[in-house]
Amino acid sequence: MMKASLLARRAGLTVSILILFLLFCYLFFPTAKIDAVIAQVLSRQGLTLTPSVHKTLLPGLGWDNLLLSSEQGPLLHSESLRVRPLLLPLFAGRVVISGSATIGNGHLDVRYALNGKAALDLAADGVSLSGIPFFKSVLGAKAVGSLWSQGTLKRGAKGLSGDLKLEVKQLELSGVKLGAFSLPDVANLKTQGMVRVSDGNARLESFTFEGDGIYMRISGDLPSGANAGVTPLNMTLEIMPKPEFLEKQKLVFMLLAKFMTSPGVYKVPIRGTLLKPVII
């Protein structure tokens, strides 16, 4: 009994010292160094992040009116982003970082553990695509819809594994251009998909778009990690229009004719990078 009590006291003392150390680092570590590290990582991909980070009341970091941009223009805007360590898991010997972002009327919440089997929990809801500048800056497109996503990742000997579910409600896309090719304008689409992560590699298993007169499916490997923005894409978009839909946008499909693999089926290879996707 005395031995168990002694071990509990030692564990409590260890956790207390760790918490005090984190608070000390938080109070005295300059945010300018954090900005410098972030800027260095992003600059390798031609990205910038503004404004500067600031400390929050609870131990953590925050950005207000965050804007991630590339040479093409703004990519992502968030009214508020907060990142902080969770103190309670420290008593179990786990280091967990919590992140929450407000994007328009929607939100994105992430918990990432630096150790232990449970690695990541993600939940997003109500994120309006019209409030994400990426579609206009990179794809030249107008996007409408509400994004929902949820998933978990586990940590194994070979890396992270798990699933992330995706859904966009009332999706509309118009003006999408990938390199020299345009994609058909679509509206009122039902969508669903899944990102599967296995041994640290992410793959879009299948993201389907179904609407009046058209069915589309995109799949392929997804770039991940610190260099995701400049990692080559290897994805395929399948487009299956009904005759009446094809007739309405026949110019687009005339240009895509070389990708027709059978009557009414187009398999379009998407290459380039996330920041400069192209059809070749």
Image (tube, helix red, strand yellow):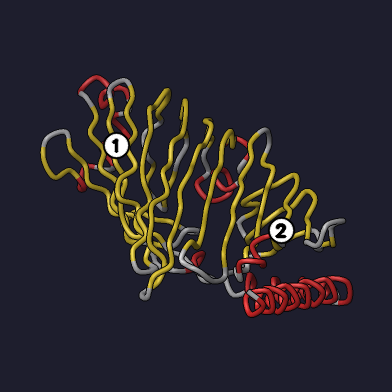
- The structure residue drawn at horizontal position 75% and vertical position 47%, both measured from the top left corner, is 80
Say which label, 1 or 2, has the lower sequence index.
Answer: 2
Q: Which residue is mark 1?
A: 216
At 67% from the left and 33% from the top, the residue drawn is 105
Quadrant containing the C terminus is: bottom left
Disc 2 residue type?
Val
Circle 1 SS class: strand
Residue 266 is situated, as x and y percent measured from the top left of the image, at: 21, 42
Above or below — where is 130 with respect to 42? above
Nearer-the-camera pick, 137 or 224: 224
- In the image, 151 versus 116, the foreground residue is 116
Q: Which residue is mark 2?
A: 83
Disc 2 element: strand
Q: Position of residue 135 (x, y in %)?
A: 54, 44
Position of 247 with respect to 55 (left or right) is left
On the picture, is 259 further left or further right than 178? left
- Most extreme residue toward the left, as rendered? 262
Which residue is painted at 32% across and 37% down in the image? 208
Q: CA distance from mark 1 to mark 2?
A: 37 Å
Question: Left or right: where does residue 179 sit relative to residue 86?
Answer: left
Task: Please identify the quadrant where the N terminus is shown.
Answer: bottom right
